Structure formats: C-alpha cells, structure tokens
C-alpha cells in the first residue's frame, strides 16, 4: 500500500524545534511523517504509545494531538525493571514543557485496562517491540490476552499499529529472542484472533537488501532492517 499523504499538522509535529537532536537523527530511518500519516493519528486523538523507549514517538504524538488530545506512554511492568528505566523516561517527558497531555503508565502486559480507558482510544501504537512480548523476560505473558486488551481499549473503528523487524517468511516466533525479529504473518494471525480486521500495510520501512538473518543490533544492518508496518482496525459496532 502506498504511503498516505501527510497533513500539515503531522509535518509540523515532526519539524518541532523542541524535539531532541537524538530523535531528529533517527528520522531518516524511521520516516515519521509517513508512518504517522499511515497511523491516522490526528489532533484531539487519544493515543497509546506502547513501550515508548526514549519517547521518540511519544513527543511527536503529543505535539500532534494537542491540548484536546491525550498520549499514554505505556511501559509494561515487565520492561520497567530495565536498567534504562523507561518508566522514569516516560514520566520525565510528561513533565517537559509542551507535553502536559502525556501520561506515563505501567501495568503487566496482558492485564485488562482500567475502565476509564475502555472504548476511548483512537490509536494504539507499538514500534519494533511486538516481538519482545514473546520473549523469556516476559515470563510467559499471554500475548493473546494482550491483543484482546488492546481491542477493549480502542473505540469502535479505532486503529492498532504494529511495526517490527521482519523475520524470514515462515519462521513464526523462532527468532524473536536471538535476532529480535518476527514473521509478519504470525503477527497478523495473532492480532486477527483478537477480533481486529487488517486495514492496511505499508512498505515505508521495507529494505529488500536485508536478508533477515542478522540480529537487528548487528552494525551491518542496525537502523536499516527490513520492517513491516501493519494497521489493524476494531470493527465499528
């Protein structure tokens, strides 16, 4: 599917002069204007940025949705013990000038969301982390229950965006831990089982030169992996 045309609001959010230099340096690899346009995030939306890391996407979403929107920087509690302290990072972003619409939140991955979030979200986003949900440090977290929780949080017609590093076709979950990659078709099957419909795919982050056999942190491919981007939709009721 071709890349969706970006709105002026998206371009302005990416061009925001307050974005950290370390974020801007990643723009060529992440193509934020194209991906945010594909996600359909718009001013006034409520968005979850799941596993926000250093806050690259959190800041862009915060600027885009504006004062009438809300961004939840969601750190699964299984990630919260990492040395990088991602929950503290999310809280620091929420305290930054201009990001008062950000709320840092944490809970076990597969836990059902609080009632205040049920059927309220416009977009749920996770970037390069879905494969992690199957790994040993997650201590057997139920990914099926997680996808159902995402479904419960979204409004009817809301979108669930999953971008991740491509594994060799047909490899399923075999390389989530050693290469940090996952088979696109496996992700589709898991998410569809939760009740979603596949609404779109984009090759914005595709790289045919990546044979998908190297670990994503290998210097030969880091930042240049072949990545899939899937948009799922909660059916309107």
Image (spheres, helix red, strand yellow):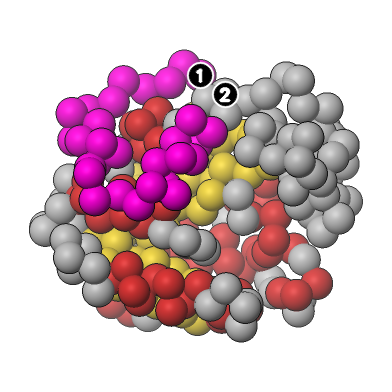
Image coordinates for residue 86, horizontal then vertical, percent: 50, 72
Q: Mark 2 points at which residue?
A: 203
* Foreground disc of the pair 1, 2: 2
State left or right for residue 206 relative to residue 3.
Answer: right
Cα distance, mark 1 to mark 2?
7 Å
Image coordinates for residue 204, horizontal then vertical, percent: 52, 25
Residue at image coords 48%, 45%: 161
Cβ atoms at labels 1 and 2 below 8 Å apart: yes
Q: Name the residue under label 1.
A: 1
State left or right for residue 176 relative to residue 158.
Answer: right
- Mark 1 or mark 2: name the one nearer the start of the chain: 1
Say which of 98 and 76 sits in front.
98
Residue at image coords 70%, 40%: 222
Say which of 122 and 56 sits in front.
56
State left or right for residue 145 relative to residue 69.
Answer: right
Number of residues whose C-alpha sits closer than 10 Å to that of mark 2, classed few (under 14), some (14–19) or many (20 or more): some
Image coordinates for residue 92, horizontal then vertical, percent: 34, 74
The residue range painted magenta reads 1-30
Q: In which quarter of the image is residue 46?
A: bottom left
Number of residues whose C-alpha sits closer than 10 Å to that of mark 1, classed few (under 14), some (14–19) or many (20 or more): few
Say which of 49 and 185 sits in front.
49
């Amino acid at each position: 599917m071709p890349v969706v045309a970006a709105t002026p609001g998206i371009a302005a959010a990416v061009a925001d002069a307050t974005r950290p230099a370390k974020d801007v340096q990643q723009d060529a690899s992440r193509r934020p204007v194209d991906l945010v346009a594909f996600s359909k995030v718009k001013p006034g939306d409520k968005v979850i940025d799941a596993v926000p890391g250093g806050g690259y996407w959190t800041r862009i979403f915060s600027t885009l949705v504006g004062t009438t929107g809300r961004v939840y920087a969601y750190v699964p509690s299984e990630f919260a013990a990492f040395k990088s302290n991602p929950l503290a990072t999310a809280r620091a972003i929420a305290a930054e000038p201009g990001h008062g619409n950000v709320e840092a939140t944490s809970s076990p991955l597969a836990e059902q969301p609080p009632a205040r979030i049920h059927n309220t979200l416009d977009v749920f986003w996770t970037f390069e982390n879905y494969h992690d949900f199957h790994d040993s440090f997650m201590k057997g977290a139920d990914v099926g229950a997680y996808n159902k929780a995402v479904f419960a949080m979204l409004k009817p017609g809301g979108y669930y965006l999953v971008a991740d590093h491509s594994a060799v076709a047909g490899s399923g979950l075999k390389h989530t831990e050693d290469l940090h990659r996952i088979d696109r078709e496996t992700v589709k099957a898991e998410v569809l089982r939760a009740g979603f419909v596949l609404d779109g795919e984009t090759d914005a982050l595709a790289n045919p030169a990546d044979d998908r056999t190297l670990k994503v942190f290998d210097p030969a491919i880091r930042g240049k992996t072949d990545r899939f981007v899937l948009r799922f939709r909660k059916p309107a009721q």
